[in-house]
Every structure is written in C-alpha cells, then in structure tokens.
Amino acid sequence: MDKLWKKRAAPIPLNWDLLPPEEPSSTTNSNGDIKDQRIWDVRECVEKFTDSLAKLKKQYRDQGDLVWDKDDSASMDFVTAVANIRAQIFGIARKSRFKIKSMAGNIIPAIATTNAVIAGLIIMEALKILSGHLDTCKTVYLNKRPTARKKLLVPCFLDKPNPKCYVCSSKPEVTVQVNCATFTVKMLEDKVLKAYLGMVAPDVEVDDGKGTILISSDEGETEENNDKCLADFAIRHSSRLKADDFLQNYSLILNIDQCNIFDDDVDFKVVGEKPRPISETEATSSKVTEKGESSSQSTSQPSTVVDDEDDIMVVVDEGQEASVSKKRKLSEDMDDKSAKKSKVTSQTRNGDDDTLIIDP
C-alpha cells in the first residue's frame, strides 16, 4: 500500500472531534448564490450527515424500506454530506448540493443492463475456475438481438493458447529490441515491464550465471541502478533477463536484441516468441501416437460427437460403421445411382432444433 500513494497525495482521515475550522465563505452568501449552490464546509457536512441520518431512520421506522429519490430532502442531504466528506479525505474538490443533485439524477441503474449481465457471466466462469473445472470454461457472447433459436447468450469453446503469445505459451519468452548503450534500467522497468508487459512489481535478474539483480520489487534495494544503462551491466545482444512478478504469478524471459536505429519517439520494440517448427521425426511420432490412441478408443467404446451449439449428441456404434468393399465399375455405379432413391424413414422435430433424420 505504501507504493500506491508514492506519486500522489495519500488520504487524510477525519477525526469527528477534531474537524477542520469552519470556513467563513461557507456560512455567508457573499457571492449571491442560492442556498443549494453554496458549497458546505466539513463541519456543515458533518451536521447535515447527522441530521439526515436521523430523518432517514425515522422514515424507515414509519414507511419500511427506503427508495432513493433525489427530490427527497433527507436523502439528498445525506448523499451530499457523505460525498463531500469523502472528497475532503481524498483531497478532491467539494461540490455544491445543486451540482451533486444533477449528478445523482443522471445515474442509470445497472440492474438488467449489459454491464450487469456480463458481470454475472464473469462470476459464473470464475466459479468454474475456483472449483477446478477449467475444461468447462467457455467464452460467452451477448448478442444485440436474439438468434434464430431465440437465444441472446451464445457460448463458445475457449481458444487454444497462442504459441506466439508470451503469456499463453508454456515457456514465455519475448525479444526486446533496445539500444543497450542508451536504454536505462528505469526505462526497462517503467516502459517495458510495467507499461507494455503489464507487470506490477517486477524482479529482474541477469541470466549470466552470477545471479546479478537488476531490478528488485523491494523498495530501495536497487534504486542506484535506475539511471545506469544496460551496457553498464554487461548486457548486450543475445543477453537473457529473467523477469518475475510474484503478485500475479507471472514470469518470462527477455531476450535482448541490440538495435541502434528506431522510429521517432520509439525507445524499444517487443517481439513475441515465434513458434518453434516441428521436425519430421516429431511429426511422425505424433501421428503414430494419435493413430494408436484412436484405434484403441474405437475398439473399446463407440465414438461420440457433441455439438455444443445445437445441443445434439450423435452416437455411432461399431456396427454402424461403413463397411469397406472393392471399387465397382463405373457402369455398375451409374446404373445403381439411377435406380437408387432416398427414403425418409422418420422425421423428428425437437423444439427449435428442427433435426431431420434421413436413412438412405
């Protein structure tokens, strides 16, 4: 949390018994403003908060559950008071009751809107991850209009990891093109690791066999390295850096590529790792393995094909597999085609699927 307020003012809590002194401009109407356009000071906000809270409690006892109404005086005083108190704590300029009322009146409830729907879908997928059912996770699209099957939500299978991606790949590596003589350690941390690669608290070690620490997430440990260039640490073309972000369980290898010429306003360039080509030996062995697995599955149980979009499951038994026969002559094949006709043995309609089964 100490790093969160390193470059901005930290919030200052208010003490109920030691509030800031009353501001003269808040009690007088020297500018000729109407009552609601006057900005309350902190003491007046506390007084309004206490009074409005007592009124809302009385309304709750008399009427039951309260409903937000910007035209209700007690509700509007309560919102104005707590908003200005919070603004005072975080160093934000306070607003008048009139301004806050205009803001609160334009808030659109998020119930049953797109944001609420997507948030609910995200929670559903998060529950699958927490329960360990990663194989059931899906990408769900929300259409503007219902589909032909009267569905707004369309689930799809997750895309396979991109081998070129430095996050999805099993051994994430990236190539960073920099000028080691001018590119500093601070630029590497802020521009490459944090801004481009999305790290929060990176630790960087030079893969030189010595374990040289270039960047540390512990505050003050490697600050003396910030203004030094990469070349000062014997980092040059083909050097490798190990970067870890333990806050996100995120690690990758940075391959340094020396580059002296860049476009205007460009200090570096990040290139994702290209997939390694598969050799002929590996391709042959993988085909043999797949063939052996498919043959063993076909002898042990019937093959199953699941169409997730249409919710149709087609099961093909061994006895239904097409038999292999010798190739017939062209004349026999033509005569057989002219005499053969397709016959509909059954027609089955299942809700919106309209599935038609034809037996040739």
Image: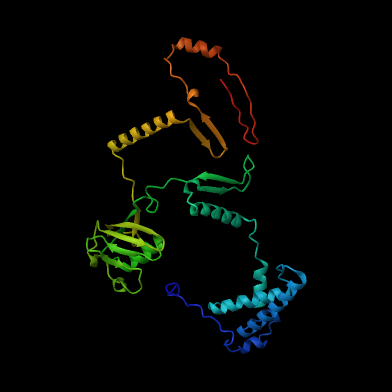
Percent of width and height locating residue 135: 47, 46
| Residue 94 appears in the figure | no
Percent of width and height locating residue 276: 31, 45
Front residue of this view, candidates 177 and 206 = 206
Q: Residue at x 40, y 31 (%)?
A: 296
Q: Quadrant of the image for the C terminus?
A: top right
Front residue of this view, candidates 190 and 172 = 172
Percent of width and height locating residue 319: 49, 23
Front residue of this view, candidates 343 and 295 = 295
Front residue of this view, candidates 346 and 78 = 346
Q: Is residue 251 above or below residue 30?
A: above
Q: Is residue 58 above or below residue 336?
A: below
Q: Is residue 266 above or below residue 329?
A: below
Q: Quadrant of the image for the N terminus?
A: bottom left
Which residue is farthest right? Answer: 62
* Left or right for 113, reference 132: right
Q: Residue at x 33, y 48 (%)?
A: 274
* Left or right for 147, reference 75: left
Q: Residue at x 62, y 76 (%)?
A: 82
